[in-house]
Structures are given as structure tokens and as C-alpha cells.
Image (cartoon, helix red, strand yellow):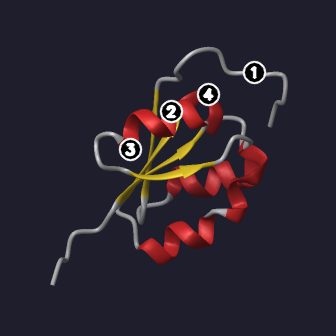
Amino acid sequence: MNSEKPAVVIGRQLFVDLWSISGFRPLVCESPDELSSFIRSIEEMDAAIVVVEKGWFERIPKSLYSKLTKSRKPVWVPFPSIGPVDLSSER
């Protein structure tokens, strides 16, 4: 029985592709506004960590951002953005 909890990466295609090479479970979500539709899947995976692109993560709805940044299960870890992130959609 494998007791290891998965590591997940979610965000734009390029970011997800690069992290999935290292074994992270990929979830492509191009728009931060759509993240809430992936939350249940992440919870069902019982993920230990969720890696996200910082610029993308900062654009999710404010109430969800606040909840996820305080989460301990899973832990949400923002990494530097890859390439330009359109910041025209503010929280």
C-alpha cells in the first residue's frame, strides 16, 4: 500500500507541462477564474502539495485566494511565473 500523497501542479499549460516532467500530477487551468471547479478534484486526490504559478495564482478570486494561502492540507506553493502573465484581470 502506497501511503505517499500526490504532488499536484495547476495553472497554465506551459507551467503545468514543465512541472509534470518532474512527476507532479498535472491539472491545466488556463484561467484563474476557473480554479474553483478543480478544488474538489484536488481534495479527492488527497494532495499534499499544490504547485502554482505565482502570477496566475495572484489572479484567482480574492476570497478563494485567502482560503488557499491559509490552507495546510494541501499546502499551496507559488513559484515564479514562466513568461508574461496578463495582469489585466485584477482580484
Label 1 packing within 10 angstroms: few (<14), some (14-19), many (20+): few
Label 3: element kind: helix
Q: Name the residue under label 4.
A: 55
Please rate how many residues cluster around mark 3, counting C-alpha atoms within 10 Å: few if below 14, some from 14 to 19, many from 20.
Answer: some
Q: Which residue is disc 2 drawn over?
A: 15
Residue 67 figure quarter:
bottom right
Amino acid type indicated by mark 3: Ser
Q: Position of residue 74 (x, y in %)?
A: 42, 62
Query: Which residue does the numbered mark 1 point to in the structure image?
Result: 86
Disc on the earlier residue, 1 or 3: 3
Q: Label 3, on which residue?
A: 20
- Give, as a three-letter code, the residue at label 1: Asp
Which quadrant would residue 32 be assigned to in this image? Answer: top right
From the top left corner, tell me how far across and down residue 43 is, in percent: 51, 72
Q: Which residue sits at x=58%, y=37%?
A: 13
In the image, residue 40 sits, relative to residue 80, either above or below, namely below
The amino acid marked with disc number 2 is Phe
Q: Which of marks 2 and 1 is nearer the N terminus?
A: 2
Q: Residue at x 41, y 61 (%)?
A: 72
Whichever of labels 4 and 3 marks the residue nearer the N terminus, that label is 3
Residue 80: where, in percent of width, then height?
Answer: 47, 24
Q: Which of marks 4 and 1 is nearer the N terminus?
A: 4
